[in-house]
Image (cartoon, helix red, strand yellow):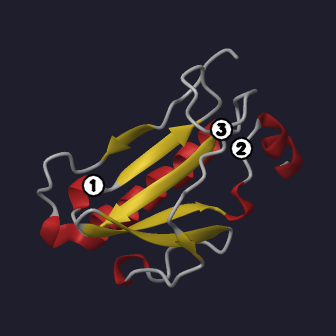
Amino acid sequence: MKSWFDLWHTHLDWKSKAGRARTQVSQLTYKIRLRAEELATTRSESIQLWATVCEDTGNNAIYVHSRNPNGTPYPYPFDGVKWDVPAPPELQGIVRNTHEIGCARYIKEIVYVIRKRAQQPVTADDAARRR
């Protein structure tokens, strides 16, 4: 294992200041997730990528996960997420049909999870097949 990710993630709105721009932050979260997916095709090790879109935009995030020495389950199981739910209003018409949306309630808010359908880890072989 050359490199690994243990639920690594980043937030676009660390200080939760984009409440009025919720649609823009949510759409940008998804677009960055797509870009990360493109970049992941250069890796030799497989990874999982997903994004969360939340009521509080400060909790929106893009996640990267792989096999790791810390023992965190891989692939990530998404316990409690109900899949194939309708897109929230801020993502209507933007999520590609190659991705699926899930929904869960965590602590104080509803969280939407966006991942590639069939949750196949992205590998360099995937990129070669697309060419």
| 107 and 99: which is toward the camera | 107
What residue type is disc 1 on?
Asn
For marks 2 and 1, the one nearer the N-term is 1
53 sits to left or right of 122: left
> As rendered, which of 94 and 113 lies closer to the eye?
113
Quarter where residue 89 is shown: bottom left
For the residues labelled 2 and 1, the Cα–Cα distance comes to 24 Å
**Residue at mark 2 to residue at mark 3: CA–CA distance:** 6 Å
At 35% from the left and 41% from the top, the residue drawn is 10
What's the CA distance linking mark 1 and mark 3? 22 Å
- Which residue is painted at 37% across and 59% down in the image? 28
| Residue 69, x across and y down, in percent | 59, 19
Instruction: Residue under label 1, please give it.
Output: 59
Q: Amino acid at mark 3?
A: Ile
Q: Is residue 79 above or below residue 89?
A: above
In this picture, is 107 found above or below 65?
below
**Mark 3 secondary-structure assignment:** loop
Give the residue pinned by disc 3: 47
* Residue at screen point 29% across, 73% down: 23
Q: Could you tell me the amino acid type at mark 2?
A: Val
Q: Circles 2 and 1: CB distance less than 8 Å?
A: no
Residue pointed to by mark 2: 122
> Does the residue at mark 2 contact the one at mark 3 (Cβ under 8 Å)?
yes
SS state under label 2: loop
Q: What SS does tag 1 mark?
A: helix
Say which label, 2 or 3, has the lower sequence index.
Answer: 3
Q: Residue furthest top?
A: 2
